[in-house]
Amino acid sequence: MCGRYALITVGEDLARQLGLEDASVHAQARYNIAPTQTVPVVAQHRQQRCVRMRWGLVPPWQKGDKNLRGFINARAETLAVRRAFYKPLRRYRCLVPADGFYEWQRQGARRQAWFFFRRDRRPFVFAGIYTPGSGEERELDGTMAIVTCAPNPLVSPIHDRMPVILGDEARSVWLSAEDHPERLLALLRPFPAGEMDGHRVSDAVNSARREGAELARPLPQAELQFHK
């Protein structure tokens, strides 16, 4: 699963690198984005600008439960068959900008956090789906989930899932009017391991209350040896 990520690139720089008209809703770097928080996304019907949504997709028939965490992830293999995901797959897709994501490796009784990112350090986008809100600006109070797939060879020793990272061409199709499930599902593949890197990070990231650049930094060598 993907339960924590970072979006470090902000505002005009984020818009420029992702080819958007406006990303001003994201004005401050965030190194520890967690479920239920409000996050910037690019919605299918607002393709050139970021809007805010809550992380945790709540199906329409459960909207009345304000305490519901919702689905933070949606498995690519079940998008076309699960009731909560099928309509969003066809009608409500989104991109979730990020600079990296965290996964946890089980080591006996403890878990070690890892941070994964593009080797060229550029921001990228996860494939997402959402359910719109009920007001006039329906995307603005929507809820979203990040789509996951089988891991690539870099991530697989750490975790059995990874978020779907879309390249430029796949990104365009994901936001298009395409509604054929098979063509959409074909986009949901592991990102090439050769274009990614990762390192161990401090256990401080385990707390969703923590924030700051130090969370994504690699462990110092002495500490790295200790954690082996």
Image (cartoon, grey):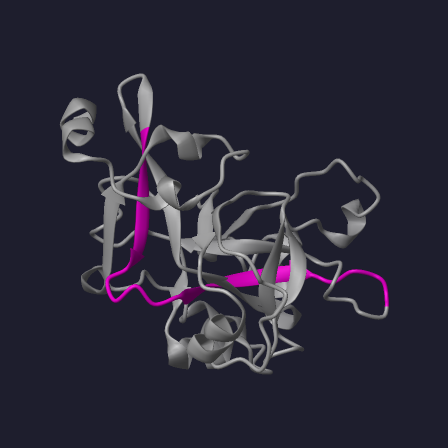
Q: Classify residue 66 by image quadrant.
A: top right
> Is the magenta region chiefly helix, strand or loop?
strand
Q: Residue at x 23, y 65 (%)?
A: 195
Tell me: residue 112, above or below residue 162.
Answer: above
Q: Count the marks: how many?
A: 0
Where residue 216 appears, x then y in whole percent? 35, 45
Q: Does 117 appear in magenta?
A: yes
Query: Can residue 162 be seen in the rendering of this structure?
Result: no
**Nearer to us in this view, 137 or 91:** 137
Range shown magenta = 112-135
Where residue 217 appears, x then y in whole percent? 30, 44
Q: Residue at x 45, y 43 (%)?
A: 212
Tell me: residue 102, above or below residue 148.
Answer: above
Tell me: residue 203, above or below residue 139.
Answer: above
Where residue 58 appears, x then y in whole percent? 70, 49
Q: Residue at x 52, y 55 (%)?
A: 146
Tell me: residue 93, above or below residue 38.
Answer: below
Where residue 75 appears, x then y in whole percent? 48, 51
**Nearer to us in this view, 88 or 126:** 126
Q: The C terminus lies in which quarter of the figure?
A: top left
Q: Left or right: 187 with respect to 180?
A: left
Query: Can residue 5 be seen in the rendering of this structure?
Result: yes
Q: Does 80 appear in magenta?
A: no
Q: The N terminus lies in which quarter of the figure?
A: top left
Q: Classify residue 130 by image quadrant.
A: bottom right
Q: Left or right: 18 with respect to 195?
A: right
Q: Residue at x 26, y 48 (%)?
A: 155
The furthest residue to the top: 109
Q: Left or right: 213 with respect to 62?
A: left
